[in-house]
Image (cartoon, grey):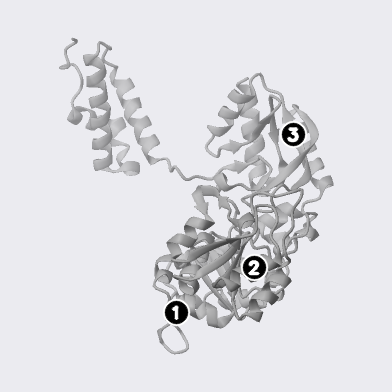
């Protein structure tokens, strides 16, 4: 065993100008902790037979440790995958007005629960509610922290200890283990399955009502499709039947588009507004998917039902915070002004023309003097519009090793996330934000220089 005495002490290292100069960035206590951690590691290594590092090497290890510990694990990346709503990359990027609203609201105090007109305490649930009712035509609206919470809260408030009819084809599981049957159980509702996996008829709903169902739940198949020998009643047919028996219909729409996807070149799907027009009493949907706002669960529909939900004890534990409400309100204003296609990044990405994408990929190729421009497909992602894609143009790169090249791209200060297909690194312009293009190209040049 080698002697440990030559290893420098904590105090001797702290007195070195290089170490003491770090205090402005990290503070004394943090530096002391890092020095001790490095010295403990060195003592263990020396006891195992390794040589004692030089003073310069110890200083470098302390500096590297502090940099590692101070690097945020949640950081900005460049999404070049072509997946517009990439769940692993944070789904919808916010529009500029949403960022401005967050900054304005968070830098000081706000009217989160203060009524300026009366000069006394107000309610936070008024924020965004008026905008949502204007946009959707709903009587009332409520915002919570995510759509899973919105569905569970609605069921807990309206169907605790009551039978809820839902088609077997809609007993879905989405990301993170969110399963409709489990959410219903946690809410206190009693699951009443109807129909089969591929076929459910209107008579199945009527039979469920005869068996004591007191609410009908519909769940959008947001991340898969059932094709082939299938059938299901339309939303107007289901709501007309339920209303004949004075039963509410709750529709978990999932993504909750406010703009008809067909206008973006996608297959038609029900918007929030259309779902309400077709008779749904409540519609639950996400704020950070096709709406393009912050993570939120939004409930719109009949006032009497919204009031019951607002009064439930779960609501306080699920309600949205001031930053969410500020960002959501700003995003909804872009829709009201008719500017969403230009200003809300998700809608802008989905709206891009093939010719523009091809031209942009071509500019990248010219700038890098590498790769080929090829046709491809962009995915919607985020559990939205399952199976649907949009045509795009990709820059296909052919490094020596696609895997190692991708690793280099992820090590930049602003990591680049690309995809690999057929040993090529593919970059899709659709999901690269305009102010990230310069950084993207500069880092790609560096990555190629290391080939």
Whole-number angstrom distance, CA of label 1 to CA of label 2: 38 Å
Crowding at dot 1, Cα within 10 Å, few <14 / some 14-19 / many 20+, comes out as few
Asked if residue 397 is positioned above or below residue 32 in the image, the reply reads above
SS state under label 1? loop
Which residue is identified by label 2? 205
Crowding at dot 3, Cα within 10 Å, few <14 / some 14-19 / many 20+, comes out as many
Residue at (66, 49) in percent of width and height: 224
Which residue is identified by label 1? 123
The circle drawn on residue 395 is 3
Which quadrant is the C terminus positioned in?
A: top right
**Nearer-N-terminus badge (3/1):** 1
Q: Nearer the viewer, mark 1 or mark 2?
A: 2
Whole-number angstrom distance, CA of label 2 to CA of label 3: 50 Å
SS state under label 3? strand
Foreground residue, 192 or 435? Answer: 192
Asked if residue 304 is positioned above or below residue 14 in the image, the reply reads below
Place of residue 157 in the rendered image (x, y in percent of width and height, measured from the top left): 46, 73
Mark 3 near mark 1, Cβ–Cβ under 8 Å? no
């Amino acid at each position: 065993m080698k002697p440990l005495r030559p290893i420098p002490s904590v105090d001797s290292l702290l007195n070195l100008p290089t170490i003491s100069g770090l205090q402005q960035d990290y503070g004394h206590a943090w530096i002391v902790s890092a020095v001790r951690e490095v010295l403990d590691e060195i003592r263990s290594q020396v006891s195992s037979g390794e040589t004692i590092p030089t003073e310069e090497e110890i200083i470098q290890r302390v500096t590297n440790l502090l940099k590692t510990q101070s690097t945020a694990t949640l950081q900005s990346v460049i999404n070049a995958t072509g997946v517009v709503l990439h769940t692993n990359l944070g789904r919808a990027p916010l529009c500029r007005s949403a960022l401005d609203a967050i900054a304005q609201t968070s830098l000081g105090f706000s009217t989160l629960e203060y009524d300026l007109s009366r000069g006394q305490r107000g309610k936070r649930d008024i924020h965004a509610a008026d905008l949502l009712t204007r946009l959707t035509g709903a009587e009332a609206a409520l915002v919570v922290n995510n759509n899973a919470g919105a569905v569970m809260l609605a069921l807990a408030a309206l169907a605790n200890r009551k039978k809820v009819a839902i088609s077997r084809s809609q007993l879905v599981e989405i990301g993170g283990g969110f399963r409709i049957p489990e959410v219903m159980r946690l809410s206190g509702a009693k699951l009443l399955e109807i129909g089969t996996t591929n076929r459910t008829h209107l008579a199945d709903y009527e039979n469920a009502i005869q068996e004591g169902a007191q609410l009908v739940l519909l769940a959008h198949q947001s991340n898969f499709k059932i094709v082939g020998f299938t059938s299901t009643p339309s939303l107007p047919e289901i709501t007309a039947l339920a209303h004949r028996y004075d039963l509410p219909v709750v529709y978990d729409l999932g993504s909750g588009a406010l703009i008809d996807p067909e206008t973006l070149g996608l297959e038609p799907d029900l918007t929030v507004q259309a779902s309400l027009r077709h008779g749904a009493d409540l519609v639950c949907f996400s704020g950070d998917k096709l709406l393009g706002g912050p993570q939120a669960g939004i409930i719109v529909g009949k006032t009497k039902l919204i009031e019951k939900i607002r009064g439930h004890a779960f609501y306080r534990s699920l309600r949205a915070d001031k930053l969410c409400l500020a960002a959501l309100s700003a995003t909804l204003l872009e829709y009201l002004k008719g500017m969403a296609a230009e200003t809300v990044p998700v809608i802008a990405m989905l709206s891009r023309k093939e010719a523009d994408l091809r031209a942009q990929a071509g500019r990248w190729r010219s700038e890098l003097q590498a790769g080929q421009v090829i046709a491809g497909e962009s995915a919607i992602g985020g559990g939205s519009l399952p199976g649907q894609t949009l045509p795009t143009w990709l820059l296909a790169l052919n490094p020596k090793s696609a895997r190692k090249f991708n690793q280099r791209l992820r090590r930049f200060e602003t990591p680049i996330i690309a995809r690999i297909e057929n040993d090529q690194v593919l970059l899709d312009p659709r999901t690269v934000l305009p102010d990230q293009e310069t950084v993207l190209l500069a880092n790609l040049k560096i990555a190629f220089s290391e080939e």
